[in-house]
């Protein structure tokens, strides 16, 4: 089925570890003891590679769908790979909502980068750095970074700065949740983009569930604590609401009878839910969610306070858990880069995903968009786009290196082949209670097959199970689904 090709495979078998070679150490300053930013004015790091003596170096910013697919496909006999990212794993985002209520365990959706590209943790000249890129100097082919440490505790390291010279740079830094500048969202709502967000949601949900049964709590406070509000009716908001209602129907109602009449889910959306889906599927989703007890509210959130949010018509909505999922936009890092931007503020790229104003700089995934001059439409912020751009970029960089253009400023005149072309293969979303939507139309306006119900749910599960990155995680996911079915969800608050 074509849907099963929505994501091309990420099996670890294709990642080739580098043969160890004794070259290149003289330029690798990263093994010198680092000084902290407070004690050094010139950050240490990796010096430029020496053509003829060392392999060219690809620096990849980000470990999301795009960056990881690129690293998996890069030929490590042609390049050294240096990956810089604040997280050392890739998140299988389509299944993230399931981890919030314990249908899946967190590790089932997190894939360590070193499994996707083993060279970064074993080959000389290739590395993974737990850090955030702060700025890019494309004239000197250098990125400036700051390490990510564990916060402000006295026993943790202070972050320090370093720099890395690149021959080719691929920016795959993703996007950030949009808040539309609404006051209080960042402080009081939880986003759903990373594993730590899902962990926070699960802890808060279970905490509220436990506290609401303790003597001394008022009726009103109990209702507030057990009111879960989701803002944003896109696929993520709908899937999360579906997971929550499943949790309530199957686990809370059976095992927490004391509070079963208090727990509620409200989904707030300014327009229609799942606006990119076929109208028939939207109606089906609305009916299913309502049947599962999810209250759908049309409204615009104006203000978020610690325990209540206010809608534009003045309605006050008290909540115990607030999850915010209203789409994504460029991150401050992307905004700060002095490259031309596509409409919408993403990094502007040409048909080969090159940043035209900067030699040897490319961008893939949610952080990039076609420049207006290409005449190409903006692509949606989807894993299937990011994954295919990552795959395209790996092929392009391999081709450039094979043609002798791997080192900095040496790829001029190389034939690049066909430009990146995206064909949408369809969208899927689950709405809970063993029901899902599968929309195989290529665009909103196009005609095509769309399905809803149990068969779609089966297709949804099978498609994602086969797309989970490694066999290890595929096994975890299958086992988690089975244990949830047989024993119910794990509700221990650890
Ligand atoms: C809950 C959820 C469910 C989803 N479900 C689907 C789905 O079913 N189907 C679908 O097609 N899409 C889905 N998506 C969208 C999809 O996940 C994204 O489009 C995709 O992750 C984009 O990939 P990316 O590599 O561009 O960015 P990301 O996956 O966001 O990765 C960005 C990476 O860059 C790193 N980074 C950020 N800033 C810096 C910096 N300054 N320096 C270095 N690294 C940096 C981040 O830590 C991260 O590792 C979902 C998204 C979410 C959140």
Image: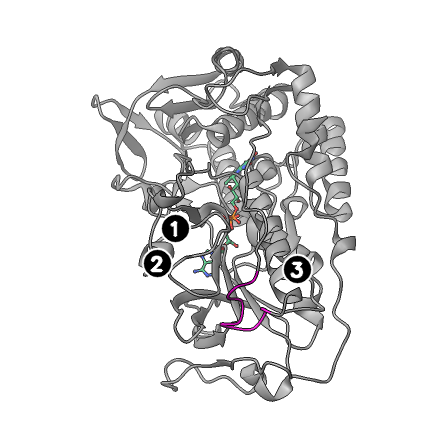
Disc nearer the start of the sequence (1/3)? 3
The answer to whether residue 419 is left or right of residue 161 is right
Q: Tell me: is circle 1 under 8 Å from ligand 1.
A: no
- Secondary structure of the residue carrying tag 1 is strand
Q: Quadrant of the N terminus?
A: top right
| Relative vertical location of residue 471 with respect to residue 205 in this rendering, above or below | below
Figure colour scheme:
one colour
Spatial separation of the CA atoms under disc 1 and disc 3? 23 Å
Q: Residue at x 64, y 59 (%)?
A: 399
Q: Tell me: is circle 3 under 8 Å from ligand 1.
A: no
Spatial separation of the CA atoms under disc 2 and disc 3? 25 Å
Image quadrant where residue 127 sits: bottom right
> Foreground residue, 300 or 52?
52
State the image coordinates of residue 476 (x, y, percent, origin top left): 74, 43
Q: Which mark is residue 167?
A: none
| Relative vertical location of residue 477 with respect to residue 282 in this rendering, above or below | below
Residue that badge 3 annotates: 74
Instruction: Look at the numbered discs 2 and 3 and tell me whether their residues touch, using CB distance below 8 Å.
Output: no
Residue that badge 2 annotates: 339
Report the magenta residues as a range.
405-414
């Amino acid at each position: 089925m074509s849907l099963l090709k929505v994501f091309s495979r990420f099996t670890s078998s294709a990642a080739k570890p580098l043969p160890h070679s004794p070259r290149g150490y003289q330029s690798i300053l990263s093994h010198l003891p680092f000084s902290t930013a407070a004690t050094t004015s010139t950050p240490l790091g990796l010096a430029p590679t020496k053509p003829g003596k060392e392999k060219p170096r690809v620096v990849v910013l980000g470990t999301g769908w795009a960056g990881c697919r690129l690293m998996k496909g890069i030929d490590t006999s042609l390049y050294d790979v240096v990956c810089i990212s604040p997280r050392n794993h890739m998140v299988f985002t389509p299944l993230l909502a399931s981890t919030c209520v314990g249908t899946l365990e967190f590790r089932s959706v997190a894939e360590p980068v070193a499994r996707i590209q083993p060279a970064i943790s074993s080959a000389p000249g290739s590395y993974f750095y737990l850090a955030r890129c702060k700025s890019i100097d494309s004239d000197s082919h250098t990125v400036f970074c700051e390490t990510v440490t564990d916060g402000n505790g006295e026993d943790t390291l202070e972050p320090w700065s370093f720099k890395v010279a690149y021959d080719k740079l691929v920016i795959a830094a993703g996007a950030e949740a949009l808040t539309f500048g609404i006051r209080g969202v960042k402080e009081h709502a939880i986003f759903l983009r990373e594993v730590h967000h899902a962990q926070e949601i699960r802890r808060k949900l279970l905490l509220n569930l436990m506290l609401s049964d303790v003597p001394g709590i008022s009726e009103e406070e109990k209702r507030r604590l057990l009111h879960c509000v989701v803002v944003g009716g896109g696929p993520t908001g709908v899937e999360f609401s579906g997971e929550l209602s499943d949790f309530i129907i199957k686990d809370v109602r059976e095992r927490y009878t004391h509070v079963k009449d208090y727990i509620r889910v409200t989904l707030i959306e300014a327009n229609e839910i799942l606006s990119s889906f076929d109208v028939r599927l939207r109606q089906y989703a609305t009916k299913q969610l309502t049947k599962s007890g999810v209250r759908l509210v049309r409204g615009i959130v104006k203000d978020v306070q610690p325990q209540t949010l206010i809608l534009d018509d003045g309605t006050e909505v008290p909540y115990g858990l607030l999850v915010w999922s209203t789409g994504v936009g460029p991150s401050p890092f992307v905004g700060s880069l002095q490259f031309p931007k596509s409409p919408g503020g993403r990094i502007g790229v040409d048909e080969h995903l090159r940043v035209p104003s900067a030699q040897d700089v490319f961008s893939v995934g949610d952080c990039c968009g076609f420049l207006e001059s290409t005449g190409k439409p903006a692509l949606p912020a989807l894993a299937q786009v990011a994954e295919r751009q990552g795959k395209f970029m790996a092929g392009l960089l391999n081709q450039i290196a094979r043609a002798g253009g791997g080192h900095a400023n040496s790829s001029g005149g190389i034939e690049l082949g066909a430009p990146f072309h995206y064909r949408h293969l369809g969208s899927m979303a689950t709405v809970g209670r063993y029901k899902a939507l599968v929309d195989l139309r290529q665009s909103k306006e196009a005609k095509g097959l769309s399905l809803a119900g149990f068969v779609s749910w089966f297709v949804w599960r099978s498609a994602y199970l086969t797309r989970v990155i490694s066999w290890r995680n595929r096994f975890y996911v299958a086992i988690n689904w089975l244990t949830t079915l047989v024993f119910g969800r794990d509700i221990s608050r650890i």
